[in-house]
Image (tube, grey):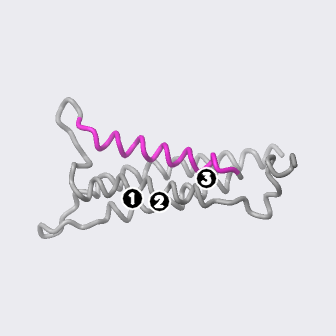
Amino acid sequence: MHRQRLTRGASYALVLVLTVELAVWGAFFVPLRIAGVPVPVGLLLALTNAPLCRAGAEVLGRRAGGVVPMLLWGVVAVMLATQRREGDLVVTNSLLGLGFLLLGLLAAAFAVGSWRPSARQGPTRATSDR
């Protein structure tokens, strides 16, 4: 039992670390241009938020496990889209910047909303109380 909890906690911590990393990487790839043409690598990295939220829900066996990575990604992404006093700004107010923020949060919301407990996790409390 103790080993299973430790494994579950380590797995969830890994999901959260990957969430932060991909939010930062995606934010820094939003302004990427090759030969003056914007490349939507940041948008592709925003889509990786969905499997991370799904993995968080699977690890904890409840929907709230997917909500935490979604909120964490949103906080990190919005922080990088907010201009600091020094003038630093990573995610600009461009079509790609807004797409990065919206696509990341919508992909995560879809993943969390469509998640259902698997058969191996057994019934949840809500269904076992009936």
- Mark 3: which secondary structure? helix
Main SS of residues in magenta? helix
In this view of the protein, which residue sits in the foreground, 20 or 127?
127
What's the amino acid at mark 1? Leu
Circle 3 sits on which residue?
56
On screen, residue 129 versus residue 56, left or right, reads right
On screen, residue 113 versus residue 20, left or right, reads right
Q: Which quadrant of the figure has residue 79?
A: top left
Circle 2 sits on which residue?
107
- Mark 2: which secondary structure? helix
Which residues make up the magenta segment?
Answer: 62-83
In this view of the protein, which residue sits in the foreground, 50 or 129?
129
Cα separation between marks 2 and 3: 14 Å
Instruction: Pick out the residue farthest to the top.
Output: 85
Circle 1 sits on which residue?
103
Query: For residue 69: magenta?
Result: yes
Cβ atoms at labels 1 and 2 below 8 Å apart: yes
